[in-house]
């Protein structure tokens, strides 16, 4: 039988997703700072050889990479912090080969 997840509770879910959105807002600021830092470093090191295409590619690559990492880690924090991880039934918990 499947255990109910704490995220099925409306109040717990509301708090958990609000915390996730707050984390993502903060990380969007960090992502913006990372993009500005990367573009500044490129401008200093490359000077006039820096093209608009390279700036767009750098901004997209750095910004999306930071946001993807933040989104995935945020989901890990959401799952762990809400108690959702504890509601999962481990079918291998009694297997002596997997649990020394």
Image (cartoon, rainbow, N blue to C red):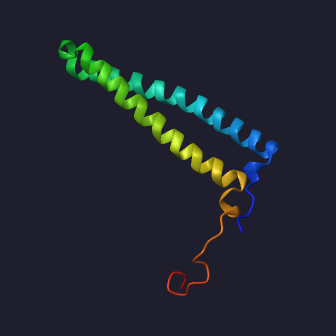
- The N terminus lies in quadrant: bottom right
Q: Is residue 100 above or below residue 5?
A: below
Q: Residue furthest left?
A: 49
**Outermost residue, right side:** 11
Q: Nearer the viewer, residue 79 or 95?
A: 95
**Residue 2 location, quadrant:** bottom right
Instruction: Find residue 45 and report its horizontal and vertical position in percent.
Output: 23, 23
Answer with the quarter of the image where residue 62 lies: top left
87 sits to left or right of 71: right
- Where residue 74 appears, as percent x and y from the top left, is 58, 43
User: Vertical placement of 52 versus 80: above or below?
Assistant: above
Residue at point 21%, 20% (across, down): 46
- Specify the quadrant of the image occupied by residue 65: top left
The residue lying toward the viewer, choosing from 58 and 13, is 13
Residue at (62%, 49%) from the top-left corner? 77
Q: Residue at x 51, y 81 (%)?
A: 98
Tell whether 65 sits left or right of 16. Answer: left
Q: How many marks?
A: 0
Left or right of 5 in this view: 70: left
In the image, is 62 to the left or to the right of 46? right
Against 75, residue 56 (above or below) is above
Residue name at image x 71 percent, y 56 percent: 83
Residue 76 position (above or below residue 21)? below
- x, y percent for residue 41: 31, 24
């Amino acid at each position: 039988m499947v255990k109910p997840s704490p995220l099925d509770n409306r109040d717990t879910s509301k708090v958990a997703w609000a915390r996730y959105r707050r984390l993502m807002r903060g990380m969007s600021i960090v992502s913006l700072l990372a993009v500005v830092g990367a573009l500044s470093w490129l401008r200093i090191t490359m000077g006039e050889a820096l093209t608009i295409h390279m700036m767009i590619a750098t901004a997209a690559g750095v910004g999306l990479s930071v946001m993807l990492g933040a989104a995935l880690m945020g989901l890990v924090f959401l799952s762990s912090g809400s108690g959702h991880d504890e509601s999962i039934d481990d079918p291998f918990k009694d297997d002596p080969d997997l649990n020394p």
